Amino acid sequence: MIHRLSTLILVTVAAIVLASCGGSSGGGGGGSASGDQPLQVGLIPNENPEEVEAQYQPLEDYLKKELGREVQLSVPTTYNAV
């Protein structure tokens, strides 16, 4: 249970940090099309992919609501693909 909670916290923090890197102030290095593309979050394949996606569905819904953009969760078949 603690492992799942720590994984959820890690994924949430990583998603927030990555989302904040694309700020809309004019000084940055471009990437204006990033708002049009979905945020892709790779999950660690430590269980059945359907179970992992179902477990992280609340995170996907939260990120969609808070970021105002499409979010795609993916569970690759190997750890190397993450």
Image (spheres, rainbow, N blue to C red):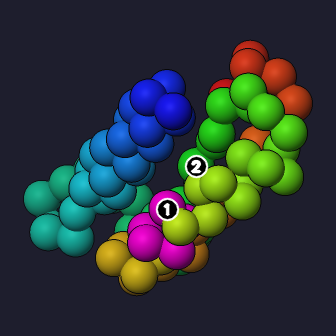
Q: Residues within 10 Å of mark 2 (few under 14, many from 20)?
A: some
Label whose residue precedes the other's in the sequence (1 or 2)? 2
Please report the residue visible at 72 percent of the width from the left and 54 percent of the height from the top.
Answer: 53
Circle 1 packing at 10 Å, graded few (<14), some (14-19), many (20+), is: some
**Whether residue 11 is visible:** no
Q: Residue at x 83, y 44 (%)?
A: 49
Q: Main secondary structure of the magenta part?
A: helix
Q: Which residues are magenta?
A: 59-63
Camera-side residue of 60 and 26: 60
Q: Are marks 1 and 2 in contact (CB under 8 Å)?
A: yes
The x, y position of residue 56, in whole percent, is 60, 55
Residue at 43% x, 72% y is: 62
Q: Position of residue 70 (x, y in %)?
A: 56, 75
Q: Quadrant of the C terminus?
A: top right
Residue type highlighted by circle 2 = Val
Q: Which residue is mark 1?
A: 59
Q: Nearer the viewer, mark 1 or mark 2?
A: 1
Residue 14: image quadrant is top left
Amino acid type at circle 1 is Leu
Tag shown at residue 41? 2
Q: Which mark is residue 38?
A: none
Question: How far across and down, in percent of the image, does residue 34 sit?
Answer: 47, 65
How many marks are shown on the rendered structure?
Answer: 2
Residue 34 can be seen, yes or no: yes
In terms of secondary structure, where does tag 2 sit?
Answer: strand
In the picture as drawn, the residue positioned furthest to the front comes out as 1
SS at circle 1? helix
